[in-house]
Image (tube, rainbow, N blue to C red):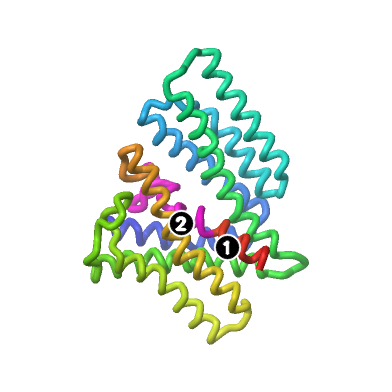
Amino acid sequence: MNFIYRLLVAIIAIPFLIWLIIQGNLYLLVLLLVLTLTGTYEMTKMIRINNKNLSKFILIPSAIVLVSSSLNKAELSLFAVILTFILFTFFDIVKGRLQFSLSRASTLLLVIFYPGFLFSYIYRLRHDFSVNGDYFGISITLSVIVLIWISDSFAYFVGMTLGKHRGLLKSSPKKSLEGFFGGLVTPFIAVMIYYYFSKDIALRYLLFSAMAAGIFGQIGDLIESILKRDCGIKDSSNLIPGHGGILDRFDSILIAIPILYYCVRFF
């Protein structure tokens, strides 16, 4: 039943996400804003499990960081982070909340950074490299998202069928070494097959996409697993049937796309 739920969500969500990436601009920005607000809310709930008393008002600066960073307004993003840090820490001073104050201050910055700032790279990858009718930004964004789906799928199936070496990572004891290598190798195989039949994207960019998806996408999954383990939960929420929450579904993308963005930008 869980597999059926995952399949139905994929059939509906994947074409819709592809359409939004192709459309870009306000359509994509609104989607990312919704994802950021939902992901930030999930993180605040996770953190509040350990009685850190993090205010839900953190959704506002997180949204500001997402929009300003997407539109390359770095100074506005920085101002939002600084002002938020000062205000929320000042509330602790006024209320005399000494316990967990250091934890709240550090998690405050994490909550703003993790969903808001990282989600903005989807918009930036889509638009910063698509100028004057050049569709490279669309192509490279879609390529890494598709490769992440391929990596996730093959890591799951290889792990289920061939996985014997499990428990190597405490953050995700069910993950196997075989599944990890399956998720690592298949994106590179996929891009080589694609490049053989189509030369519309330079090979180095396809290899960057494969690296981002196969290596850093799986690292992104493990990073979120660490956060959830610390909070003692299995999923960030139950919003998406068969998938968990927004952070569960986009954990790989949140790490892979910023890595790909800078690879494309600097190399």
Q: Position of residue 136 (x, y in %)?
A: 66, 70
Q: Is residue 192 visible?
A: yes
Residue for point 52% across, 46% down: 35
Report crowding for label 2: few under 14, some 14 to 19, many 20 or more residues within 10 A (C-alpha).
many
Q: Quadrant of the N terminus?
A: bottom left
Q: Give the mark, 2 or 1, whose residue is nearer the N terminus.
A: 2
Q: Percent position (x, y) of residue 72?
A: 71, 49
Q: Is residue 1 visible?
A: no
239 in magenta: yes
Left or right of residue 163: residue 191: right
Residue drawn at (31%, 38%) of the image: 232
Judging from the image, what secondary structure is the residue with disc 2 in? helix
Q: Amino acid at mark 2?
A: Ser
Residue, disc 2: 252
Q: Tell me the amino acid under the disc marked 1.
A: Leu
Q: On screen, 101 above or below 45? A: above
Percent x, y of residue 247: 44, 47
Q: 18 or 120: which is nearer to us?
A: 120
The answer for how far apart the CA atoms under marks 2 and 1 are is: 12 Å
Q: Residue furthest left?
A: 164
Q: Residue at the spot x=35%, y=58% of the render?
A: 6
Q: Which region shows up in magenta?
A: 237-256
| Element marked by disc 1 | helix
- Looking at the image, the residue that sits furthest to the right is 132
**Looking at the rendered structure, which numbered label has been put on residue 260?**
1
Which of the 4 image quadrants contains residue 141? Answer: bottom right
